[in-house]
Amino acid sequence: MSREKQTSTGPAVVVVIGGGIAGLCAARELAAAGQQVTVLEASASLGGSVASHELAGLTLDAGAESFSTRSDTVPALARELGLGNLIRTPNSAGAWLHLPSQDGGSIDLPLPKSGLLGIPADVRDPELARLIGRAASVRASLDRALPLGGLLNQEQLSLGAVVRARMGPEVLKRLVAPVVGGVLSADPDGLDVDAAVPGLRAMMRKHGSLGAAVGAMRKAAPAGTAVAGLDGGMHQLATALTQRLEQAGVILRTSGRVRDLERTSDGWTVTSEAQTLKAAAVVVATDGPSAVDLLIPTVPRLSEDRPEVVPAVALVSLVVDVPQLDAAPRGTGVLVAPDTPGVRAKALTHATAKWAWLAERAGPGSHVLRLSFGRGAGDDETARLPDEDLFKAALQDASVLLGIEIDPADVVDWDVVRWTNALPHATLGHRDRVARVRAAAADDRSLEITGAWLAGTGLVSVIDNARDRGAALARRLATGT
């Protein structure tokens, strides 16, 4: 289908569909280039999963509460928004693992700090045997000697397949699966290794083993911990972005889902629940299924790559008055291995143990706990339980995971936040799917698509991609090419 080229070099009206972090960052690039931008968001608030809620007088993150420090992407944006002085690193104590024991019960052990998504960098670490057993530790040590063979030549390769082949099934089950499940709400066997850990294949070829590759990647990362956050919460990033956009004259509209997107001879017609707009160009920054559904009439080829709806994740936040937790008995939180008996949560974050600024604001004896439910498996219905049932499950699981009984009377305040499609999985063939989507959309120079379903999970990937896509569209509009 032929497309009309933008011939004017003056400001163009651009509609950004989706007001999450991707949409806000793309809008910022376009506004900085002098374009007239309107952002349409279906929900009542902007920022997507970088959100907040109020509990017991505390403003807490309701979604993302940290960012990866593998690049300067988020710190740079924070500095641009005047938040650079708020960047904080978490407590170095680190998280623990809650694992099945040989007697049918469970055990709790600290998570090795030198790994990457649970993959150990040093298979000779004596602590590894405690986590996975002596026999499994011996099997993992073969990673240092086994030839790579044709493993890395496979076109579609999962993270689980790499770990299983190099270090054995117990490393995968007891280390990698809990971390990937807790952090990404995904199964390592369904994650594309190149999207989950970009550059891992190349580092394995260079260093000859998985452990050596992980060690080199950790060494090459910026000094400090693997994650950081903001004093006061990551939600401030979305608030500051919104304020800067308003100051730049960007029109921000919430509570109005876009129902129809039509390509016309001179641009686009965007119809939401609240209004109909004419635009010279559009940026679609929604979740994957919504983006494809909107664009199929214009780009029919996208129907072949419509992603599946990502199962819901439920976060239960508790503010409790339990002075015994001042000792942080499980570090900054606990990651739960699949099939561990007696616990339905996949992770617990002891937020007041993780972040010193939050502990100071909460005060002695007062603690913020956040439990995550929903592993992404089709048979995991826990995240769909009613709020009251999830609250009861969270209390029970928190007591088990922290080793301290927490009663309803100890709870000062609580809330349940549910996310659907907030953590899209980079499943096998992710790079090829992204390439096909990009190729299908490339025919229309007035269209850009961004968001985690293409960029990958995590603020670094989402922000980088959104800024790149917004800037590229701004250049085309400015030059008429």
Image (cartoon, grey):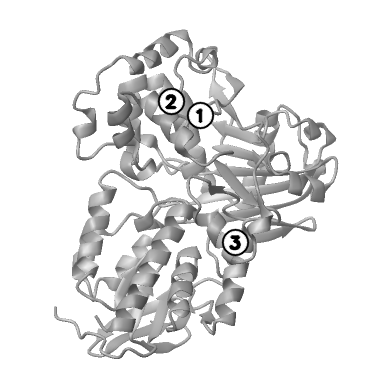
Circle nearer the N terminus (1, 2): 2
| Image quadrant in which you'd find residue 442 | bottom left
Query: Image quadrant for the N terminus?
Result: bottom left
Q: Residues within 10 Å of mark 2 (few under 14, many from 20)?
A: many
* Residue position marked by numbered label 1 in the rendering: 337
| Image quadrant in which you'd find residue 376 | top left
Asked if residue 140 shows in the view, the reply is yes
Badge 2 amino acid: Lys
> Closest to the observer: 412 or 147?
147
Direction from residue 412 to residue 372 in the image, left or right: left
> Closest to the observer: 142 or 187?
142
* Residue position marked by numbered label 3 in the rendering: 79
x, y (%) of residue 9? 32, 88
x, y (%) of residue 102? 52, 13
Badge 3 amino acid: Arg
Circle nearer the N terminus (3, 1): 3
